[in-house]
Image (cartoon, grey):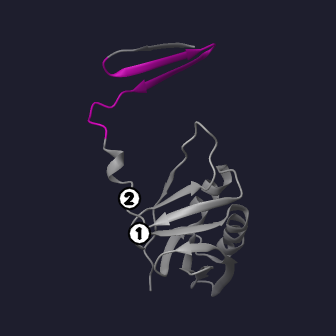
Amino acid sequence: MKVSFDKSNAFFEYGDTKLACRLIDARYPDYNAVIPADNPNVLTVSRSDFQNSLKRIVIYANKTTNQVILNIADGSLTVSAQDLDFSNEATEQLSCSYEGEPLQIGFNAKFLVEMLNVLEGEEVKLEMSTATRAGILVPTEQESGEDIMMLVMPVMLSN
C-alpha cells in the first residue's frame, strides 16, 4: 500500500484502488470529556440472554426510535418496548447482577444489539450514572492486550 499526504489531503493506493481523504483543519475534540468517569450503577448480565431479549423486544418498539426501556433493580432487569401508534408492547424479565440505585433508562435497541454482536464472552457490564447520561458497555473478561469500551447514549423517555 502506498500512503502519501500534503497539507490538506491524504492519499492511499492499493493496486487499482485509489482513495483521497480530506484532512480536517481543526482541533480534534477531547473524547475523554464525553466518557463518564463516575458510574455507580453497574449491571452485569449474560451477553447472549440480553442480546436475544433485545432482538425479541425491538419487534414491538416504535420503528423510528427502536426505543427499549430497561428497568433495573436488585437482581432483576426488565426489558420493555411500546409502540403507541400500533398498540404494540412487550416485556421480558432477565436475571442479572446489579449494584446501585433502581434505574429506568431508555436505549436504541438496534445500537445495543450491534454492540453486543461484536463482544465476546459470557457476560457484559453496563456502567451507568443517571438515565440522561451515557453508559459504558464492557465485556467482563477481556483478552490480554485488549481494552474494549463502548459508549452508548440513552434516549429520552416520554413518560
The image shows residue 117, relative to residue 86, as above or below, that is above
According to the image, label 1 marks what residue?
A: 129
Q: Residues within 10 Å of mark 2 (few under 14, many from 20)?
A: some
- The percent position of residue 153, horizontal first and vertical second, equals 45, 62
Stretch in magenta: 7-28
Residue 131, position as x, y percentages in the image: 42, 74
Looking at the image, residue 108 sits to the left or right of residue 119; the answer is left
Tag shown at residue 84 = none
Give the left or right position of residue 56, taking residue 34 as reference.
right
Residue 84 among those drawn in magenta: no
- Give the quadrant of the N terminus: top right
Between 12 and 116, which is closer to the camera in this rendering? Answer: 116
Query: Which quadrant of the view contains residue 109?
Result: bottom right
Per the model, the C-alpha gap separating discs 2 and 1 is: 8 Å
Residue in view at x 57 percent, y 81 percent: 74
Q: Per the image, is 23 magenta?
A: yes
The picture quadrant where one finds residue 77 is bottom right
Residue shown at the point (42%, 20%) measured from the top left: 10
Q: Which amino acid does label 2 sit on?
A: Pro
Query: Helix or strand or loop: what does disc 2 sit on?
Result: loop
Q: Residue at x 67, y 53 (%)?
A: 117
User: Residue at (28%, 30%) from the top-left corner?
Assistant: 25
- The 10 Å Cα crowd at callout 1, few under 14, some 14 to 19, many 20 or more, is some
Query: In the rendered structure, are the residues bearing label 2 and label 1 in contact, judged by CB atoms less than 8 Å apart?
Result: yes
Q: Name the residue under label 2.
A: 36
Left or right: 55, with 70 as reference point: right
Q: What residue type is labelled 1?
A: Ser
Camera-side residue of 91 and 23: 91
Relative to 47, does residue 103 appear above or below in the rendering? below
